[in-house]
Image (cartoon, rainbow, N blue to C red):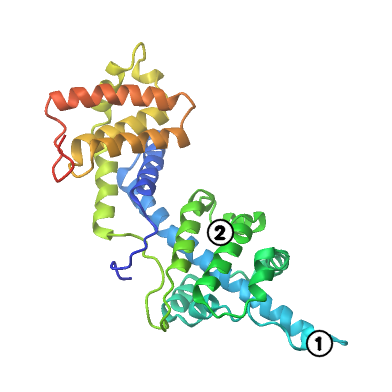
């Protein structure tokens, strides 16, 4: 897929999380293999794109369900006038047609064997619930034919009915137990994808997000962050312990130790990443993945280490806006 696409699934925070998870596995494994950990990280990242495809296809499954209901109503023994002359506005939503007609998407769905067939009845129930929403009712009586309005409707049903549905979550978890953690970033990218669909004929155009924004750079970031943290683990552990009052390295929570070691790796070995960005990122990760007190603890230790690393010349940032 083209790297010129403005939308990408993966961002640096997501990559940091994957490296963090890989390091946690590495640190807790007897006779760990860094090469295997790296391979597992990239396999996990690659599976994020499959999750994204499943969510895009889920939107398409709603149109299948809606069309099926219309056909069933027409075939009733005593169909009403509305059954025989249904409002086709929903099933003729331009988002559905763009997705169905896109060659690239169809090829990827077939290659990945993506399907919601087993959950079709559940998708029907979700659609029926959405039909009761005032937004849907107002949409169905509109007379204009605007792509932007069509996009808004699909974003509405996806974000408020599909992506938050327990049945959907269970089905995704059946595919991959780790997808629950990846669901927010994949769902957000699906919304961006819908919002960015073009007005022109997109049959042979790339309408999907790329996995990486710049693949070579992002993959190098992962590899260096992983391996340099492992290579310097002992030294960084001692540095952290020296700044943690009354705490021996063994008494510092493993999650905190890994996060701080990764932060030091970025400070020392990633000249293009600003110091403030690194500090903010690992404080945020501490909030999400460690103990309630970790934020203050990690912030205090890293602040002291930044001063020491700068004084010793071990932090060298290059580029506009990076030199402090």
Along the viewing direction, whichever of 204 and 256 lies nearer the viewer: 204
For the point 33% across and 22% down, which residue is it?
300
Please identify the quadrant where the C terminus is shown: top left
> Which circle marks residue 81 in the picture?
1
Graded by Cα atoms within 10 Å as few (under 14), some (14 to 19) or many (20 or more), the crowding at tag 2 reads: few
Of residues 266 and 146, the one drawn nearer to the viewer in this rendering: 146
Q: Nearer the viewer, mark 1 or mark 2?
A: 1
Q: Crowding at label 1, few (<14), some or many (≥20) Cα neighbours within 10 Å?
A: few
Would you place residue 149 above or below residue 8 in this image?
below
Residue 297 position (above or below residue 46) = above
Q: Is residue 238 left or right of residue 90?
A: left
Q: Say left or right for 262 vs 145.
A: left
Q: Which residue is mark 2?
A: 175
Res 31 visible: no
Q: Residue at x 23, y 35 (%)?
A: 267
The N terminus, quarter of image: bottom left
Which residue shows up at 43% across the image and 26% down it?
294
**Residue 284: which quarter of the image?**
top left
Q: Position of residue 214 (x, y in %)?
A: 27, 59
- Indicate which disc, 1 or 2, sits on the residue closer to the N terminus: 1
Question: Gap in Å between the C-alphas at discs 1 and 2?
Answer: 43 Å
């Amino acid at each position: 897929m083209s790297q010129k696409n403005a939308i990408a699934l993966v961002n640096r925070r997501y990559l940091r999380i994957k490296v963090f998870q890989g390091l946690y596995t590495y640190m807790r494994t007897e006779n760990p293999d860094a090469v295997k950990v790296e391979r597992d990280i990239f396999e996990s990242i690659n599976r994020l794109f499959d999750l994204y495809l499943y969510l895009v296809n889920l939107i398409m499954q709603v149109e299948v369900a809606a069309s099926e209901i219309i056909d069933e109503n027409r075939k009733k023994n005593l169909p009403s006038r509305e059954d025989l002359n249904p409002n086709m506005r929903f099933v003729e939503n331009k988002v559905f047609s763009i997705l169905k007609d896109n060659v690239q998407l169809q090829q990827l769905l077939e290659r990945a064997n993506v399907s919601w067939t087993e959950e079709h009845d559940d998708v029907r129930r979700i659609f029926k619930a959405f039909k009761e929403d005032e937004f849907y009712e107002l949409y169905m009586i509109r007379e204009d034919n605007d792509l932007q309005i069509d996009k808004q409707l699909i974003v509405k049903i996806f974000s408020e009915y599909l992506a938050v549905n327990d049945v959907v979550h269970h089905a995704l978890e059946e595919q991959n137990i780790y997808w629950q953690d990846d669901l927010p970033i994949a769902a957000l990218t699906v919304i961006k994808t819908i919002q960015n669909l073009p007005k022109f004929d997109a049959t042979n155009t790339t309408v999907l997000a790329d996995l990486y924004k710049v693949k070579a750079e992002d993959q190098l970031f992962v590899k260096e962050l992983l391996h340099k943290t492992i290579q310097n683990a002992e030294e960084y552990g001692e540095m952290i312990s020296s700044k943690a009052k009354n705490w021996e390295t063994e008494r510092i929570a493993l999650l905190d130790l890994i996060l701080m070691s990764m932060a030091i790796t970025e400070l020392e070995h990633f000249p293009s990443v600003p110091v403030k960005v690194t500090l903010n990122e690992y404080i945020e990760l501490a909030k999400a993945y460690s103990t309630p007190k970790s934020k203050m603890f990690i912030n205090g230790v890293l602040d002291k280490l930044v001063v020491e690393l700068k004084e010793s010349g071990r932090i060298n940032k290059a580029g506009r806006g990076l030199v402090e």
